[in-house]
Image (spheres, rainbow, N blue to C red):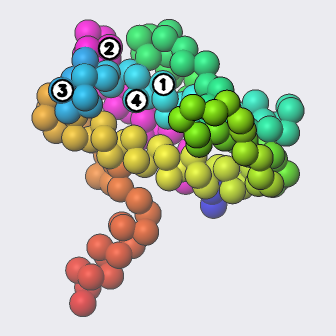
Amino acid sequence: MLHTSAKDLLSQLNLIIEACREEDFSKPLPELSNSTFGQHIRHTLEFFICLFDAKNDGIVNYDQRKHDALIETDKKLAQSVIVSIEDFLNRNQEDFEITFEANYAIKDNVNDKMKSSFYRELAYNIEHAIHHMALLKVAVKQSLTYISLPEYFGVASSTIRYRAITKEN
């Protein structure tokens, strides 16, 4: 189920990347604190890339993202990254152990390490993607109104289920 959810979110991202005009993809937007549509896409995708890389070395560290400026400025490259992530998810259906590393200190350069797993980190990536999609939704509704958003874009599945229950009662 995690794989299906992740691929659904990636598909939604692909749709809005396709709909975004080239000149708007890397234009600073006030609703995003002057970051760009493409930067949020890149940031979201790079978390998946970090997880992808963890298959090889057994360590996931989201702080060590590449911050690849090409992904945030080239729509076609961003879309090809999505295809690569989807392919990875299709080929990796089984859970495996991962060491999660992160540095939560502002001044110290020391990583905390903890046990995790591919499934746990994939769930985190799903939640992280939804968060950034919700931010993108604000920008689309304010500045990029020509982009048509999927119905549940940027909404957590638990919220969708809750709304369905409360409408019925």
**Is the N terminus in the top left, top right, bottom left or bottom right quadrant?**
bottom right
Looking at the rendered structure, the kind of residue marked 2 is: Ser
Q: Marks 4 and 2, how far apart in space?
A: 10 Å
Residue range in magenta is 5-27
Q: Which of the numbered marks, if any, corresponds to residue 40?
A: 4
Secondary structure beneath dot 3 equals: helix
Q: Are marks 4 and 3 in contact (CB under 8 Å)?
A: no
Dot 4 or dot 3: first in sequence order is 3
Spatial distance from mark 1 to mark 4, Cα to Cα? 5 Å
Q: State if disc 4 and disc 1 touch (CB < 8 Å).
A: yes
Q: Residues within 10 Å of mark 4 (few under 14, many from 20)?
A: some
Name the residue beneath numbered marker 2. Answer: 26
Q: Nearer the viewer, residue 96 or 100?
A: 100
Marking on residue 93: none
* Residue that badge 1 annotates: 42
Crowd rating for badge 1 (residues with CA inside 10 Å; few <14, some 14–19, many 20+): many
Residue 31: x, y in percent? 20, 32
Crowding at mark 2 (Cα within 10 Å: few <14, some 14-19, many 20+): some
Looking at the rendered structure, the kind of residue marked 1 is Arg
Q: CA distance from mark 1 to mark 3?
A: 18 Å
Is residue 126 found left or right of 100 in the rendered image?
left
Quadrant occupied by the C terminus: bottom left
Label 2 to label 1: alpha-carbon separation: 11 Å
